[in-house]
Amino acid sequence: QDLERRGAEREKRREALAEEWARREVEFKEISGNVIVAARDLQTYLEQSPLTGLSPGRLDAIDPLLAPGHFPSIDDISGLTDLYFDEMARSGQVGLAEADFVGRDGDDRRGSILTVGRFTAFYRDGGEVGFLTYSPDSRKFFALSERPSRFARRMLDRYFDGVSAVVPFDMSGGAALRQLTRKQTLMEHLRSGGPIVIPIIVIGIAAIVIVLRKVRFLDQVRRNTGKYMTRVNLLASEGKWDECEAIVKRHKGEHSPVNHVIDAGLAARHEDRETLESILQEAILRELPRLERGLSPLAIFGAVAPLLGLLGTVTGMIETFNVITVFGTGDPKLMSSGISEALVTTEVGLVVAIPVMLLHTFLSRRVDAILGEMEEKAVSLTNIIEKERRRGGASR
């Protein structure tokens, strides 16, 4: 009976202990789970940190916590806390160390690595300085393929030498630096606009050809207007009509508008003033289409280029909406081609249209100025012929 009583007491004690163990086991599992979650978060955080590239052994203290069946101790939790504080402290410091990195040529190198917190890392290998990117997978630093600008390199050299306290760095933690290596060339940018960019570029090239030829032609006409008509008027005022006609014949093969006007005026110098003025005005108007040749195509090009850009915008948006209809809006990359076509064609159309319209206005003003100068010289020639007629010299 005594043994049965003691056995019953022990059974109650065992049940009480089992109940206490179950309660504490739940608490232990909750604590263990929280510590494991914190350890995994810290491991991911440290793997992404470029500071780990200089101290790869930091992660060794976390690996035992993530082993199956391991129950964290107070020392383990203290170790996690120390790692957190260590990362916080290093993130607010500027560090300089000799370490390995992959150079721009793809070979392993060893040089001075400067870290500005966990934002940006720089290297100096001999006389070369540049930015570094950190790869969490390989836990290595890689030199950026694009070298910094000359101004940025000078700032880095001065900072490495301790001369200056100013240094450029990437606040985005490397995202902005990665964009430097993804710059599109002009051809890639135009190619993203789709096939409609081709006729816009053709319009731009045709407009450039017309403008260059027109500028050259108008410059020649303006020089001739100031040179020949001034010379002819001077000779006419002296009554040297034979020399005036010789100048006209000498430049007749040039098909110059000014020469035609002078020729018409000299041929009609025996007419009365009203007739002479009409003949000169007719000669000037006859040369007007030649002076304005090419301006109408420029105006058309300036109007058509933005319309083609708008057409590319419409087709690009239609493609984008078709992609959204089929695949939804989950993946922006699927919509990027349509959006690029929509924006690039408008951009190229405006880039072509705006200079073409400005050049059309500029050339139109020059034509008006040349016509005004020709009319002025024609009136001057009329007055000279009228004076010579009164003196009896125009009949010779």
Image: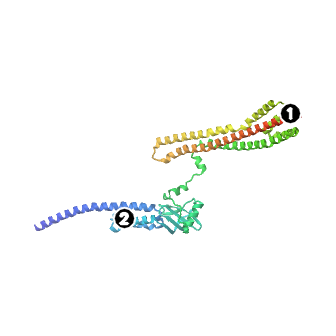
Task: Give amino acid for label 1.
Answer: Arg
Q: Could you tell me which residue is drawn at 50 percent across and 46 percent down?
A: 334
Q: Residue furthest left?
A: 1
Left or right of 277, for residue 137: left
Q: Is residue 30 above or below residue 275?
A: below
Q: Eyeballing the image, is 251 above or below 270?
A: below
Colouring rule applied to residues = rainbow
Q: Measuring from the top left, give residue 300's x and y in whole percent.
A: 64, 37
Mark 2 lies on residue: 65
Nearest to the observer: residue 165 or residue 135:
165
- Where residue 384 sits in the image (x, y, percent)? 83, 37
Q: Position of residue 83 (x, y in %)?
A: 40, 66
Quarter holding the N terminus is: bottom left
The alpha-carbon separation of the residues under discs 2 and 1 comes to: 119 Å
Determine the image quadrant of residue 348.
top right
Callouts 2 and 1 close, C-beta under 8 Å: no
Image-quadrant location for residue 210: top right
Quadrant of the image containing the C terminus = top right
Mark 2 or mark 1, which has the lower sequence index? 2
Residue 109 in view of the camera: no
What secondary structure is found at the residue carrying circle 2? helix
Three-letter code for the amino acid on which mark 2 is drawn: Leu
Find the residue positioned furthest to the right: 396
2 vs 1, front mark = 1
Say which residue label 1 marks.
390
Question: From this viewpoint, is residue 24 visible?
Answer: yes
Find residue 223 and report its horizontal and vertical position in percent.
Answer: 77, 44
Residue 366 placement: quadrant: top right
Q: Residue at x 58, y 45 (%)?
A: 347
Q: Is residue 301 left or right of residue 272?
A: left
Give me the residue at 59% from left, 40% from top. Answer: 306
**Crowd around label 1: few <14 · some 14–19 · many ≥20 (10 Å):** few
